[in-house]
Image (tube, rainbow, N blue to C red):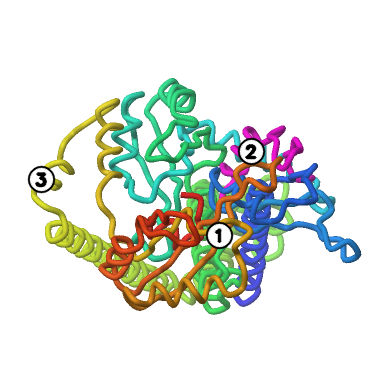
Amino acid sequence: MEQSIRMVLMKQTIAYQQQKNKTFQRHQVLVLMCRVYVGSISFELKEDTIRQSFLPFGPIKSINMSWDPVTQKHKGFAFVEYEIPEAAQLALEQMNGVMIGGRNIKVNVVGRPSNMPQAQAVIDEIQEEAKQYNRIYVASIHQDLNEEDIKSVFEAFGPIVYCKLAQGPTGNKHKGYGFIEYETAQAANEAIASMNLFDLGGQYLRVGRAITPPNALLGPSTGSNVLPTAAAVAAAAATAKIQAMDAVASNVAALGELENCLSKLTQPAASIPIVAPAQASSLAAPPVIAPPGLALPAAVVPPPGVAIPQKLPNNIIQPALVQPVLSGPVPTNLSQAQISNRSTVAHQQEAMRRAAEAQLKQQEELQKKLLDQNEPQTLQQQENMSIKGQNARHFVMQKLMRKVDSRVVILRNMVGPEDVDESLQDEIQEECSKYGQVERVIIYNERQSEDDENDVIVKIFVEFYETWEAEKARDSLTGRYFGGRMVQASLYDQTLFEHSDFSG
């Protein structure tokens, strides 16, 4: 039994290792599909420019630019790694040949590493799996839009199976991209052709075909790298016992058949005592001990061959019957353990499912309560409206025009590029402190074109501690003159400011 357990454990370990290697290899290929090579980059461009150009296609995980330590400039190429392969595929399709910084950049797939010669085969396998689903990838989605808004816009092309936006780490905001699955491939193709580069809320949507199947990015968990020893030994022991039970059952069945055959063969032996005495009497030999053994071989050789098993079954069947008796309790104990384990696992799964349902229901109730408290009745009615197509787009645009509180004031036409010095920031902070507590001041030089370096607009962002302080500063500073310039003050979008987007 111990040797059987070791054999089963070894087979399980080998199978588990093969499955783990396959899963890890697939995960490596998915990471490889998330990367693109960007070449022919102008030496004047920095990493921020590359990030800003490639960010609309999806969240960027990292940008690797090779720097020359002598010239303190990059070498003209970079590697951009996205969080998902679809973003890299869209960037590959739409950014190759685009002019940035006076040069047409080149965007290609990353070369396959020499230690993974089978990478292309795995990529082809993943893409073939993705073709079974009519999924599309949508990026550059406005933060104020939710799944229902996107679904209402894309429903114009056909019935939607599901629409899912990738949620951020906090769960309050999405990551700006999502997936939509249609019932038909025609609807998916029409949505890609019509909605790519569609202006929705001031942002151009990026729409393309999904090149990975659902849940493809769920990589191997770190906790499952090692097979649990106790679980493996227990599973191997159970498997070995089951195999032993099957072997015992097969032996018992085989011995039963053998016993039936022997019982059938022993039936003709009943005539042997009749024949032997007749022959013995016909020979008229008084000695009955030795002569029958010598006189009967010619006529009675087959019957002794058949009659011998009458004594042998006791010798053969006895050991065979001992094995089932010794191992008889094993199947009974094993079945009870299996039933107990299965019932325990079933109870645990049922408890986990009920807990998940309760938590989901609680979250939905909390969300509904917050919406009821924050939204007026008219907006609640708008949220429950069923709209599609062009009306949906108009409704989404109206939703984006809702007032959003901001603590940031942007000052335009206050100074020129030549007026920016080290003391300007302190002067602005001192002046704005009259209206409230100033958190920070940012002076941003925005270049209007790549050719003319003198065409630069200076924007000044002032962030206050409270919203009413920002509104007070806006009302007081707008229309005032500073150095012969009339200042234009207005509130700036808080979300854009927090994401260091000063282009608004």
Residue holding disc 3: 378
Please provide percent x and percent y for residue 8.
Answer: 61, 66
Comparing labels 3 and 1, the label whose residue is closer to the camera: 1
**For marks 1 and 2 on the same chain, the one whose residue lies earlier in the sequence:** 2
Residue holding disc 1: 444
Please provide percent x and percent y for residue 351.
Answer: 26, 68
SS state under label 2: helix
- Near-viewer residue (383 or 441): 441
Disc 1 marks which amino acid? Tyr
Q: Is residue 277 left or right of residue 293?
A: left
Comparing labels 3 and 2, the label whose residue is closer to the camera: 3
Q: Is residue 149 above or below residue 255?
A: above
Magenta segment: 84-111
Q: Label 1 crowding class (10 Å Cα cut-off): few <14, some 14-19, many 20+?
A: some
Residue at left 59%, top 33%?
128
- Cα–Cα gap, marks 3 and 1: 40 Å
Answer with the quarter of the image where residue 285 lies: bottom right
Identify the disc placed on residue 125: 2
| In the image, residue 429 lies in the stretch drawn in magenta | no
Comparing labels 1 and 2, the label whose residue is closer to the camera: 1
Residue at left 32%, top 47%?
146
CB under 8 Å between discs 3 and 1: no
Disc 2 marks which amino acid? Glu
